[in-house]
Amino acid sequence: MAGRPAEWSSALCGVGLGAVCLNAAVCTFQINRGAAAGFLLQALAALLGAVGFFWTPLGLSLAADSQSCLWVSTVLGLPLLGFGFHWLNGDHSTANILLGGALLLATGLEYVTEEGRAMAAQSVIVVTSITILILSIFTMNVYGMLASLVLSMAGLLLGVKTERLLTLRKEAVLSCLLAAGNLAFQWALRTQHFDLD
């Protein structure tokens, strides 16, 4: 029973991440549909993880499916955000390279070990956040720079070998960082859209 508050905090942070991503998907649908699809994938993965926690007392289990869904949402969702950001700025070649690499990686899910999945997820987060950071620096998009730095912190947190950070579980802190990064990224897309108009 001692672990219940920590589990509740992780589940509630997952619901918060899902709500932020779902709102971002709705708000960016008219700006760029690729970015909206990236937000939607992340929202579905976060909500599936939270629902899995709430269904466990009922005897239902989504553990295996939620891990695969989380990995695919990371490998496809973040590159879709990067795709939308680069496409909106006219950098079509980088946008296509990000999306093509993500699709190739996502199709090989069953052939990759757990360590390989963790390394691939970290690589996707780092590559996507660096390309967003470079483009944000050139376009002077402060929200894009902030989103990139927060996503990089989330990528670094994935590699930390600890169960808890301060008093929260690692999953809760990761969900909070991803929610802040996705919110900043939504503002970056809006700023870029208004600057181009």
Image: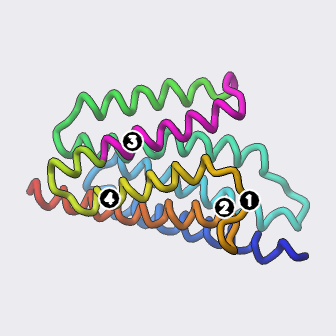
Q: Which is closer to the viewer, label 3 or label 4? A: 3
Residue 125 located within the stretch drawn in magenta: yes
> What is the span of residues highlighted in magenta in the rendered image?
110-132
> Which of disc 1 and disc 2 is earlier in sequence?
1
Q: Residue at x 50, y 36 (%)?
A: 123
Locate the C terminus by quadrant. bottom left
When the figure is inspected, residue 80 is found, relative to residue 185, above or below; the finding is above
Q: Does the magenta stretch include residue 148?
A: no
Q: Which amino acid does label 3 sit on?
A: Thr
Residue 162 in the figure: left or right of residue 145 = right
Q: Percent position (x, y) of residue 43?
A: 53, 58
Q: How far apart are marks 1 and 3 (CA)?
A: 26 Å
Q: In this view, does 14 lie to the left or right of 148?
A: right
Q: Mark 1 — residue?
A: 163
Pointer 1 or 4: first along the chain: 4
Secondary structure at numbered mark 1:
loop
Nearer the observer: mark 2 or 3; the answer is 2
